Amino acid sequence: MPVAQVKAGSPARRRRAAGIGPTKRIEDELREQNERFSAAVENMSHGLCMFDADERMIICNRHYLDIFCLDPAIVRPGIRFFDILQHSVEIGVASHSAADLYAIRKPYIDGAKPSTYEETLSDGRIIDISHRPLASGGWVSIYEDITVQRRAELELKEQHRRFDAALANMSQGLLMYDADGKMIVRNERFLELYNVTAADFPLGTTHRDALERLVELGIYTKIDVDSEVAKTEACRKAAKIHSTYRHLSDGRTLLVTRRPMSGGWVATFDDVTERQLVEERMTHLAHHDTLTNLPNRSMFRERLDKALSEATVAPMAIFSLDLDRFKA
């Protein structure tokens, strides 16, 4: 029988058109999804590579190739994971043999659980690798060059080590306060100078609490805590250095110097007891006779000048006595 002609508006034509339409829409949607996926992968800030259950590459992005300096003509979908490792060895990027690298990675592949590890390349770069297994077998790995971050962390660690060493070997005691007046740094020399323990002055102690604690322990003679706190705050706001002598109950004298810094201040403590004794002794020698320890001519002149300047206020008389053969 001849095939019957189907009219444009017939049910058969409509059924055939309906059958083609959904299929094309699905294909278009899949194509758009693939395009979006590819665009997302290519614009990632990290490298990405996906492998199937047979350890063959499904997809990778440009950043992955750039990190490991891989040849895109060689590293293509379908290449085995081991062959990628071998390629990185051949171009001198890998710091181990392909067999060693595979042995390192194999436990993560077989473990089928998320994991993160680092790999150091032959040029010293450090790559952070995040391994994530796929439900269908295989895995996806994310690669990030963390060389700068690691170097910064090492430099910061070294700075902390040097800072701690400097604090530990200072001849001065040191306290550092933040903008809220809370102690954030304290060295051992401070504890030694005041003969106290770290438990007496834990980090977080306020300036006021520290002063009150020193009075409570009987280390400071009575001081006006409110006045001292106000002076410190005024100097901090004015960005001025302030120094004061602290006389301890054991007879020693400390020079306390407070220096403003960004957001807070730092206080240093010097034991100047010997220095003050020397200065007092020098001053005494300058105004007293070394033999008799009596006031000498220098002190006489100073006192006479002072008395003369005040003579307009009160009457004054001078009595001079000469002793014959005084030295004998």
Image (tube, rainbow, N blue to C red):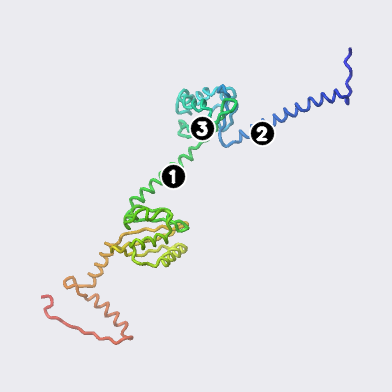
Image coordinates for residue 43, horizontal then vertical, percent: 61, 36
Q: Secondary structure at mark 1?
A: helix
Whole-percent x, y for residue 106 in the image: 49, 25
Callout 3 crowding tier (Cα within 10 Å): few <14, some 14–19, many ≥20: some
Label 2 sits on a secondary structure element that is helix
Up-down relation of residue 246 to residue 312 (above or below): above
Residue 73 in the image: above or below residue 309:
above
Q: Which mark's residue is nearer the viewer, 1 or 3?
A: 3
Q: Name the residue type under label 2.
A: Arg
Picture quarter with the N terminus? top right
Amino acid type, label 1: Leu
Q: Which residue has dot 1 on it?
A: 156
Q: Which residue is mark 2?
A: 36
The residue under the point 71% across, 31% down is 29
Res 35 label? none
The residue most toward the front is 216
Identify residue for label 3.
115
| Numbered disc in front, either 2 or 3 | 3
Compare residues 67 and 59 and report the one nearer the observer. 59
Q: Secondary structure at mark 3?
A: strand
- Residue 203 percent coordinates (x, y): 41, 53
Q: Nearer the viewer, residue 203 or 126?
A: 203
Q: Earlier in the sequence, mark 2 or mark 3?
A: 2
Quadrant of the rendered image containing residue 228: bottom left
- N-terminal of the pair, mark 1 or mark 3, is 3
Number of other residues with Cα within 10 Å of mark 1, as a class: few under 14, some 14 to 19, many 20 or more: few
**Label 3 is placed on what type of residue?**
Ser
Q: Position of residue 99 (x, y in %)?
A: 46, 22
